[in-house]
Amino acid sequence: MKTIAIIGSCDTKYREICYMRELIEAQGVKALVIDVATGPNPSKGYDISREEVAESAGVSWQDMESKSKGEKISFMTEAVAGYVEKIYQERKVDGIVSAGGLQNTVMATAAMQRLPIGVPKVMATTVASGRKTFESIVADKDIVTIPSICDFTGLNLVTRQIIANACAACVGMVKNAGKPLEKGKKIVVGVTLMGITNAGACAAVDELERLGIEAIGFHTTGVGGAIMEKMAEDGLINGILDLTTHEITQEYFKGGFSYGEDAKYRLVKGVQKKVPLVISVGGLDFIDFCVGEFPERMDERVYMMHNANTAHIKLLPDEAEITTQRFVDRVNKIDYPVKLLIPTDGMRHNTRKGEELYYPEVDEIILRKIKNITNPNVEIITIPGNLDTKEWGIQAAHHMIDELKERGIIGEEVSYK
């Protein structure tokens, strides 16, 4: 019988958890309730006690009782994540669901993040509303997040329906679809893109697919690039066509629409696994910020409104020096052969002469610093034109094919000529 783990605090959320068990088991799926309570009151209705969870992490719960609330939550977050990962590897669970506020969300999603992409994970949470980011909740995994509408203070007309929807979603996935990603026989290449490089990147995707390669597009707005890096690390991707490295620039500013903590993994995890790599400079020349959060010196800046809420802002020359050096530093650490593609007429759309983000001085700074890369493992290739064009993207795809051939991933029978 399929089994869904329910993670919750079986002291304060006992009623909600019992309701979740009833809903799941009524649909012919076994429920396994894991208690993560940290308060002083007794828990009930669980299958796995908090004591057992703590002991699985090598600590007696008695030793935790004198700790502060924050220390207990921090400990249980790691402990339950490790416990769930273990029982999943033992094939004792097929999915995971939870409902709660911030404390329960942090603990439950930490466990969900340990499971592979494709395994059903559903979180009904008070955190899924307002001006909050979901990076700490979802991270680089496929966690279905459902706004709770109201707080989980018992069962009422709202919480009953939200919990029912969350359980039904998880049961449906477990019964009919949910399984971890498995790489098939086809060669897989990850391609990074944004709206500003979409024409070039999609042309590259189409060309790779025409040549029998399975291409996956990753949206580099704070998390997409990091997910691609993780999939490469996990062996799900054979090659990376990293056309849009914008997240590395945005990382310097520690904010903006495309900022994400996991940008630190860009040009890192895939490189550590020595995945065949073709890099380019898409979006290295700009940052994106919402209205009301603009960076300083806007009176000096060239920018355009991407939509009613977000502006695309060209870097200033001094910023281009700094941010490009950060890109160069990562490229200089690569210790196996890769290709670096440079356009001659813009790193995104709207940057050619007469267009809104035309600022040749900034482009020249970026390209000059990149052309001075000293790493002998990096082959620098200039492709005429703007990166965000069909013709440019097709040529980039051909260089990816060449790289895969040189690394022995595909044979000479794959020909684009």
Image (cartoon, grey):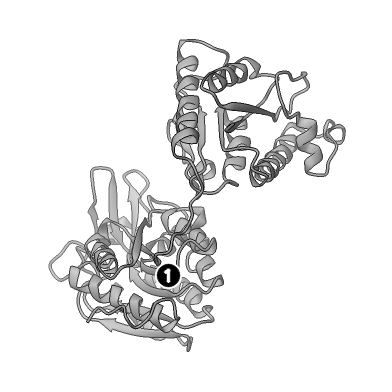
Mark 1, residue position:
239
Residue with the most extreme front position: 1
Residue 103: quarter of image: top right
Vertical arrangement, residue 281 with respect to residue 58, above or below? below
Along the horizontal axis of the image, is 338 left or right of 52?
Answer: left
Residue farthest toward the top in the current orientation of the protein = 156
What's the amino acid at mark 1? Answer: Gly
Relative vertical location of residue 384 with respect to residue 164 in this rendering, above or below: below
The relative height of residue 231 versus residue 211 in the rendered view (above or below) is above
The quadrant in which the N terminus is found is top right
Residue drawn at x 48%, y 33% as measured from the top left: 175
- Report the number of numbered marks: 1
In percent of width and height, residue 199 lies at 21, 62
Residue 318 location (% of width, % of height): 38, 71
Q: Secondary structure at mark 1?
A: strand
The residue nearer to you, when weighing 153 against 287, is 153
